[in-house]
Image (cartoon, rainbow, N blue to C red):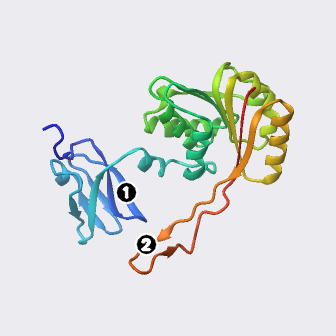
Amino acid sequence: MAGGPKLIEDGDEALLYVNEKKSWLVRIERGKKFHTHKGLIDLEELIGKQYGTEAKTTLGATLKVIPSDYLDHLERIMRRTQVIYPKDTALITMLANVRPGSRVVECGTGSGALTSYLATHVAPSGMVYTYEVRGEFQANARKNLEKLNLMKHVEMKLKDITNGIDETEVDAVVLDMATPWMAIEKVKEALRMGGRVVSFSPTINQVEKTVEGLNTAGFVNVKALELIMRTYKVKYNETRPDMVMVGHTGYIVSARRC
């Protein structure tokens, strides 16, 4: 029935949720059992039940069965490189004005985490052209993007972006590289008039060189910023900031081609 409760089907990918620190992403299949330190669960027994139902392991632990989504997969991406934190990924995507239909150049691909987020935003008709200089990183990123079913929105290139960008009149360029200032002239050639460039760097020295390079190249609206995120422990009459927070992760520089 349309709009009715969603039932768990054979072949579904689902999240077995214990708490915010412990959960597992599994494929529900007949004849399959899933082993955890909290006991074993027979996945076949979940087929036909409603999502949101509670299931018990052989050791009596209670799990909730939740439909999986993109973020569940992103958290489990195979990592061979340091990935950009979600707080920065979201802001980078907004500052680059990435939207459905956008043509975006990215450098470098790394594990494909940022690539995947950009791809979800350019869909269904846009494209991400992602450049990487290391073949092993590119191969790993391809596997991750295939798992997320996003390769139809991504074109991968094994090439140093400082030697040139194949695309022209693109809407945005996103740089996650050690020396972004060395790519600025090539970025300017690839961007359409009014297009945006956003760069992510972990040190302030990189920011200084990147901002200087953008100003010299005639870019406008050049900005540098840092995003700090603080979470809270919420409990009635005891709410306070968490003792541990995500502080400095990197600096973001943005600008527009003029």
Quarter of the figure that contains the C terminus: top right
User: Residue 116: percent from the left, percent from the top?
Assistant: 52, 38
Residue, x 50% and y 40% (percent of image)?
A: 144
Q: Disc 2 marks which residue?
A: 234
Q: Disc 1 marks which residue?
A: 24
- In this view of the protein, which residue sits in the foreground, 40 or 167? 167
Farthest residue to the front: give it: 221
Judged from the image, the secondary structure of the residue bearing numbered disc 1 is strand
- The picture quadrant where one finds residue 112 is top right
User: Residue 149: percent from the left, percent from the top?
Assistant: 43, 34
Which kind of residue does numbered mark 2 sit on? Val
Residue, x 77% and y 39% (percent of image)?
A: 180
Q: Is residue 80 above or below residue 96?
A: below
Mark found first going from the N terminus, 1 or 2: 1
- The picture quadrant where one finds residue 60 is bottom left
Mark in the foreground, 1 or 2: 2
Neighbourhood count class around disc 1 (C-alpha, 10 Å): few under 14, some 14–19, many 20 upward: some
Which kind of residue does numbered mark 1 sit on? Trp
User: Residue 34: percent from the left, percent from the top?
Assistant: 30, 57
